[in-house]
Amino acid sequence: RNSTAIDAKDGTVVGTVDLDGKPEQATADGAGHLFVDLKDKAVVARIDARKLAIDQRWPIAGCDRPTSIALDKKARRLFVGCRNLMLYVMDSENGRVITHLPIGDNVDNTVFDPGTGLIFTSTEDAKITVMHEDGPDAYRVVETVKTAPGSKTMALDLKTHRLFVPYGEVEKVAATPGSTGGGKVDLSGMRKRVLPNTFGVLVVGIGDSPPATARRTLATTGPDTMEGMMKAWIAAFNKTHPDAEVTFALKECHPEDRCTAGPDVDEVFANTSAAYAEKYRYEPFRVMVSLGGYDTPGHIQALGVYVHPSNPIQKLTLAQLDAIYSPERRRGHPADVTAWGDVGLGGEWASKPIHAYGRSLSNEVAWYFKDIVTLDGPYKPSYIQPGKAASVDIMTALAGDPYGIGYSGFAYRTDKVKAIALADRDGVYVEPSRMAVASAKYPLQRPLYIYVNRAPGKPLEPLAREFLAFVLSEEGQQIGAVDGMLPLPLALAAAEQARLQ
């Protein structure tokens, strides 16, 4: 009823963990945790190998006498064989039971082959049940292999994907005091033993690939600014989902198209929202997958608002910016803003005119600023669009115009301009910095989204849900941090994960 830790270097006992239950088998995740099924408690105990202590105990509802356990380390899935003819699939992070599958009688061993995605259980009724992991939350029975009576243990060769199953003819004999030879004594005082000259090993050839099945496909599309990130996610996802194929195609997107960049259930699409809504009668489902960048040239990055260094203004609200750039003031600012005195400057600055600079109206940066700041309100006729290389030209113009204000990515900021703090509302001003963007607090950061065709009230298509769940996982967020892109904070990623259900 305990587990003993032994130092493999010298064989010394390091410590003992009280399991408070009868252990059957154990498996390790290679990251400091050991999982043990407790037969008499119908519980999986997770041991912290560093502390030599149980840190979690997970009851398996519906399981009778768990006697075998295996683990898919990448998908973080436990496979627990129970004596009531069921294999239970559990989340190794939190113990959640995901599903259960029918297996043979009196299970003794469970193994998982990460190369094929196959799960095997061997049972005393001379059967090996073969199951396939279609995805982290999708499993099915593939076939049942007939073996030999009593052949309920097995070993898997991960290189050849072959199973080795020992067998032998057995007989029941009376258990006598001091007798050896193994085998449990039943209620009648009998035990089983293998007859001489009957021992053998069955070799079960599974092959190098899982059984043929319909290949699941998912097409994604997006602009070149998301290409590196999407391809990194797709490569990692496809590697751990051999039955699935997610693809990515570049799609040139006009700023006003609100270009979708991600998996769609029915088709690869890049339409205007109006066209999409007209076709499907609902808006696409949007999932935030990255905070975007901070100051990486050539990639999506947060926008700063800049003025001349001599300008005493230190901060503005988005409502004030809206009133500077748009005549409609959709954010509710009480009056038009045309002079610096209208946003609180006094003295000689009070009467000085505001010169509002920005990108060309055909540019995605101008479209984003218009969407977020003016709430899609039109720009004023006085809006200034300098030069062709607008980001650089805006910085140059502001460096020579004490009364100017403009926006651009942080990659183009120079020491000849000053970035100001912004607030979505009065009183909550955020200084422009990498930390502010990385914490998802900056008002003009540019998150990246994947759009999916999901009808209101309907579940996501399984492969789309699996792919998005991977993207939002801790591993996925680390993989997606390419080209200067910033991962979502854990709480925000968890909130987006919850929306997938």
Image: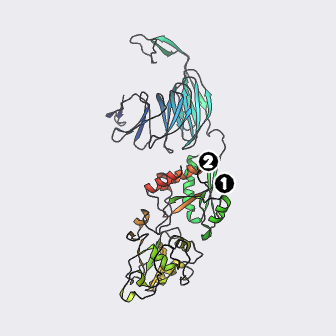
Place residue 124 in its image quadrant.
Answer: top right
Rendering coords of residue 48 (x, y %): 37, 40
Residue type highlighted by circle 2: Ala
Dot 1 corresponds to which residue? 266
Rendering coords of residue 431 (x, y %): 39, 71
Q: Name the mark nearer the viewer: 2 or 1.
A: 1
Question: What label does residue 497 carry, if any?
Answer: none
Which quadrant is the N terminus positioned in? top left
Q: Residue furthest front?
A: 334
Dot 2 corresponds to which residue? 244
Q: Spatial distance from mark 2 to mark 1, Cα to Cα?
A: 16 Å
Q: Is residue 105 above or below residue 73?
A: above
Q: Is residue 286 above or below residue 183?
A: below
Please report the residue visible at 51 percent of the width from the left and 70 percent of the height from the top. 372
Q: Is residue 462 above or below residue 408?
A: above
First-in-chain label (2 vs 1): 2
Rendering coords of residue 407 (x, y %): 48, 76
Please report the residue visible at 38 percent of the width from the left and 12 percent of the height from the top. 178
Q: Is residue 340 above or below residue 179?
A: below
Rendering coords of residue 128 (x, y %): 58, 29
The colour mode here is rainbow
| Callout 1 secondary element | loop
